[in-house]
Image (spheres, rainbow, N blue to C red):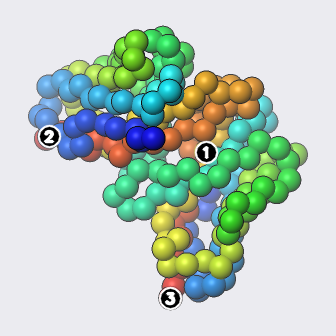
């Protein structure tokens, strides 16, 4: 069974700090990796996706992928209180659009 | 470009009834996937439709079914509702993916409560 593991948190960081969110996955055939942000009572919002080993940066967000270690992470620089949300890691294999989600990490950015 | 829309947003049903939820994907997107989100199980994949064909199905009982129309709009149906079906049902749309798979964009969801 394909599994995606995340620390459930809660993770608290002060405003302006770097928040580091981690995710491991069990299926070595996984090829696409996504980070979603979900505010309480709202639907998941796509933040970033990464397909290749290494880093991918988009504004304050950096996704890091290490397929050998089956590990993907999300770094949020200069964290803001508005970043407080649950962050969901999702993985898919090949061209399949079926996403397997982790349970999410709850992030709180303290003013 | 308008996002994914889902109707209704909220629904209250009683055990044994059936329910139909609707999803309109982003214009130009042909793939629609359905997910169930509960506090205990998190986000779980139900099924995916592409060009009116179910291409993938998650581990849910046959009471959960769906279909897709020629305009890519999709419906999912749950028959003989159980208390455990209370959840947020999310629809996600994506364009035809490349080899690595396409990004999925979620609608606002339908909150189903079964009494």
Relative to residue A70, is residue A28 depicted above or below? above
Chain bearing tag 1 is A
- Could you say where residue A44 lies in the image, as x and y percent from the top left? 47, 51
At horizontal 31% and vertical 37% (from top left) the residue drawn is B6
Relative to residue B87, is residue A59 depicted above or below? below
Chain bearing tag 3 is A
Q: Which residue is mark 2?
A: B12
At horizontal 36% and vertical 30% (from top left) the residue drawn is B24
Residue A90 marker: 1
State the CA–CA distance, disc 2 to disc 1: 30 Å
- Could you say where residue B104 lies in the image, as x and y percent from the top left? 55, 38
Q: Split into 4 quadrants, where in the image is the C terminus of chain B?
A: top left
State the CA–CA distance, disc 3 to disc 2: 39 Å
Label 1 sits on a secondary structure element that is: strand
Residue B51 marker: none
Residue B67 appears in which quarter of the rendering? top left
Q: Which residue is mark 3?
A: A111
Relative to residue B16, is residue B112 depicted above or below? below
Binning the other alpha carbons within 10 Å of mark 1 as few (below 14), some (14 to 19) or many (20 upward) gives many
Q: Nearer the viewer, mark 1 or mark 3?
A: 3
Binning the other alpha carbons within 10 Å of mark 3 as few (below 14), some (14 to 19) or many (20 upward) gives few
Label 2 sits on a secondary structure element that is: strand
């Amino acid at each position: 069974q394909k599994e995606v593991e995340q620390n459930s948190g809660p993770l608290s960081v002060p405003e302006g700090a770097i928040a580091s969110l981690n995710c491991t996955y069990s299926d070595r055939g996984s090829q696409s990796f996504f980070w979603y942000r979900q505010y309480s009572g709202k639907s998941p919002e796509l933040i970033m996706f990464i397909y290749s080993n290494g880093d991918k940066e988009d504004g304050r967000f950096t996704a890091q992928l290490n397929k050998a270690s089956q590990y993907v992470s999300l770094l949020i620089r200069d964290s803001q209180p508005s970043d407080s949300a649950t962050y969901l890691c999702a993985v898919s294999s090949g061209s399949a659009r079926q996403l397997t989600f982790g349970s999410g990490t709850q992030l709180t950015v303290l003013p | 470009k308008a996002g994914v829309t889902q109707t209704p947003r909220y629904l209250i049903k009683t055990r044994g009834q059936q329910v139909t939820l609707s999803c309109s994907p982003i214009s130009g997107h042909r793939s629609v996937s359905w997910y169930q989100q509960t506090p205990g199980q998190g986000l779980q994949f139900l099924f995916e439709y592409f060009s009116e064909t179910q291409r993938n199905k998650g581990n849910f009982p046959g009471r959960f079914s769906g279909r897709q129309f020629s305009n890519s709009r999709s419906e999912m149906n749950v028959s003989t509702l159980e208390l455990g079906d209370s959840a947020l049902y999310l629809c996600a749309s994506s364009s035809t993916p490349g080899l690595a798979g396409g990004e999925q964009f979620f609608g606002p969801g339908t909150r189903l409560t079964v009494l």
